[in-house]
Amino acid sequence: MEMVQVVFLTVLMFFVIVTVHEWGHYYFAKRAGILVREFAIGFGPKLFSYKRNETQFTLRLLPFGGYARMAGEDPELIEIQTGQTIAVRLNNENQVKRIYLDQLDNRKNVIRGEVQFIDLEERLSLRLDVDGEFQQYEVHPQAMMVAKGTETQIAPKDRQFGSKSVGQRALAIFAGPAMNFILAFILFAVYIQMVGLPVENPTYVQIGKVSEGMPADEANLQEGDIVESINGTPIGADAQKIIELTSASADKPMEWTIRRGDQVLNVTLTPRTVKGEEGGKVGIVAQMPTRQAGFTETITGSGKAMVETTNIIFVGFKQLIEKFSMDDLGGPVRTFEVTGQIAKSGIDQLTQWAAILSLYLGIFNLLPIPALDGSRLIFLGVEALRGKPVDPNKEGMVHFIGFAMLFLLMIAVTYNDILRLING
């Protein structure tokens, strides 16, 4: 049951982090009037899909991220050529509401003809040759093209990503990482509320987490117990002393004096050696006493955690560049593994870890790497300085190459993660 809960919490955490990021793109794109064709979590084959208003919401198999696909970012997949035979269905205002590209003989209540003229971006009109008679039609701005059983909404020029101002496009792109920063700030604040703040000038050390199956668990020590002395040595507020005394007593019985509320308990513990670790272990995390954080303390504490974690992330980037090694990289498999281990430590630790991952995702996406949000913002900055956009084909090629390289790197680190798991 615990394993099911850990898996559920791990998947839920990633789902929330990615969804918040993509929702940022989606929300500000919609505010700018951009048609968002798909809001997807994950990549690859669809697991679940439903359509709401103009957007298809999908959950996909590979949990490597997500995307909000906006009209005009990529070349339209469906094009109608002059001379092509199509069928159209009109609404009550005689506007084209549906355009059928195949199975024309099976379509009912339609007008079938050969395309003489069509403009689905600016003029929103088309002209058909229907049995030798030319007929002109206005196209509804939300008309659907139907081919191979799939409906694709047309994207007039004013609904496409490229038609919006540099500021609107930059906001739609930056909003993804920004939502991750906001989520990280909120999660750090929630974590502070969960664990509290250290008491000033503490006089004692208390037991935090107790590992199942270890000597402390077998002796029924509990979270919140105060360690008063070990082998007659007073502990006071010196958590390091507990570690030193325990480490030096591997396989040797120790006498612990514990205070639990108004009770004083004398407990005998025998520290064990743990593979890969030095000295004896009893299976506890010693922690200093804490108090409930106030509102102002929570806000300032969360901001401080954001700054400190950001510094650690950039130090990690620097070390990775200076001493690059595949063993230092972790993909989705390793991240899921670490998250699962943290989830076993409690919801408070998982909340802090989620805050760190959300902040990391926001920062990573702003790096000037092709295919990431940071690279797209650089192209918009160049456009703002030049007064005209970079050639879309050249920009698209840069992003495509960047995405391909990131995907290959993801495959490599995932393979590395799997080998690490197999080899223990």
Image: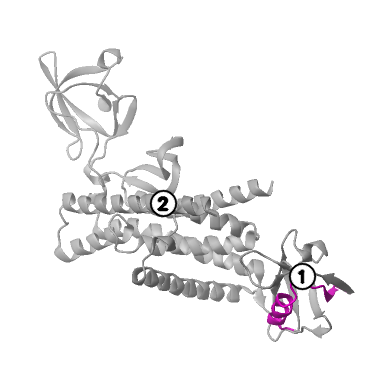
Where does residue 127 sit, x and y in percent of width and height? 14, 26
Instruction: Using the rendered view, name the quadrant where residue 299 is placed.
Output: bottom right
Circle 2: residue type: Glu
Of labels 2 and 1, the one closer to you: 1
Q: What residue do we see at 40% from left, 51% from top? A: 27
Q: For residue 129: magenta?
A: no
Residue located beneath label 2 in the image: 22
Above or below, 58 relative to 196: above
Horizontal relation, residue 204 to residue 343: left or right = right
Q: Is mark 2 on a helix, strand or loop?
A: helix
Horizontal relation, residue 353 to residue 253: left or right = left
Q: In which quarter of the image is the C terminus?
A: bottom right
**CB atoms at circles 2 and 1 under 8 Å apart?**
no
Q: What residue do we see at 76% from left, 81% from top? A: 204
Crowd band around label 1 with a 10 angstrom C-alpha radius: few (<14), some (14–19), many (20+): some
User: Which circle marks residue 262 in the picture?
Assistant: none
Where does residue 291 sit, x and y in percent of width and height? 70, 75
Crowd band around label 2 with a 10 angstrom C-alpha radius: few (<14), some (14–19), many (20+): many
Q: What residue do we see at 14% from left, 64% from top? A: 386
Q: For residue 257: magenta?
A: yes
Q: Can residue 126 be seen in this view?
A: yes
Instruction: Using the rendered view, name the quadrant where residue 283 is placed.
Output: bottom right
Q: Can residue 52 be seen in this view?
A: no
Range of magenta residues: 237-262
Q: What residue do we see at 26% from left, 39% from top? A: 155
Residue located beneath label 1 in the image: 251
Where does residue 94 sit, x and y in percent of width and height? 25, 25
Residue closest to the eye, 157 or 353: 353
